[in-house]
Image (cartoon, rainbow, N blue to C red):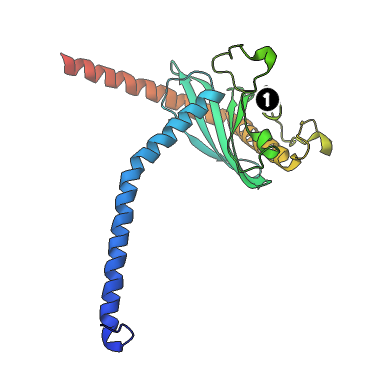
Amino acid sequence: MMDFKKTDNIFLLGLFLGVTAIVAAALMAWAFLLTEKPIAAAQKARLAKDLAKVMPAFVNAPGYGASVRQSPGGVSVRFLPAFTQGQLVGVAGEGSTPNGYAGKISVLAGLRPDGSIRSVIVTGHGETPGLGAEVCDRKEVRRIDTLFAKREAGKLADNAILDQFAGRTTSPVKWKLKKNGGDLAFKSGATITSGAVGDLTWEIAECFRSNREALCAEFQKKASGGKNMRRNQEKKASVAGK
């Protein structure tokens, strides 16, 4: 039996460890290649689903023409435009904050081209069920009087905290919760979560407001570019079919 503690066997031990590392790396690379496309497809499908919740109907690929800006508070906000017939009809802004009660919270806010908020959803959080989670989640609640009522297509499930942002516009003055002298409603027992969602929504909306002219011009240029690209593709397809 080989004794790997002996100096004579150090070379063999190193060789054995090296081969093991190479095999492990190869297996990890193989697993990555197997899962890369399904994961990317799942992320793209989720993005499309989330964008459909906060923006009007659009024809461009989800994420096409995205542009990143820094908010006044240092939040990295990714703006994603919505185009219809070559025109900008909406913008979604997504960002994250580490200031939730249980850590990171991610918000996606739908914005109209004029800067007003269309709707808001929370796309990621780890808040406490029954408390902070009720600030973040939109869940269909059936009552006796609405048991057989059919929800309007595309209408989000109600959430009093998230719904209060619809129609709002921003200014350099940050929003505050009512308990802190502002006008934002909050959930009792979940003020940290309520404040984090309110702050992040303001950061996203204010970032768009302060960059609106440049972003809209950039997006409209991309909308025209995409329209011309589709025309060229259709022209090539037509020529190829003759």
Q: Residue furthest left?
A: 242
Q: Quadrant of residue 227?
A: top left
Q: Which quadrant of the rendered structure holds the C terminus? A: top left
Say whether residue 77 is left or right of residue 13: right
Nearer to me, 34 or 199: 34
- The quadrant in which the N terminus is found is bottom left
Residue kind at label 1, given as amino acid type: Asp
Looking at the picture, tell me which residue is in the foreground, 130 or 196.
Answer: 130
The residue under label 1 is 163
- The answer to whether residue 155 is left or right of residue 163 is left
In depth, the one of 125 and 208 nearer the eye is: 125
**Rendering coords of residue 137 (x, y %):** 62, 32
User: Is any atom of residue 180 visible in this view?
Assistant: yes
Observer-nearest of 186 and 7: 7
Instruction: Looking at this view, name the residue that lies furthest to the bottom.
Output: 7
Q: Position of residue 212 (x, y in %)?
A: 59, 29
Secondary structure beneath label 1: helix
Give the residue at x 29% y 70%. 18
Tell me which corner region of the image, top left, top right, bottom left or bottom right, holds residue 193: top right
Q: Is residue 191 left or right of residue 37?
A: right
Q: Residue at x 62, y 28 (%)?
A: 138
Q: Position of residue 86 (x, y in %)?
A: 44, 18
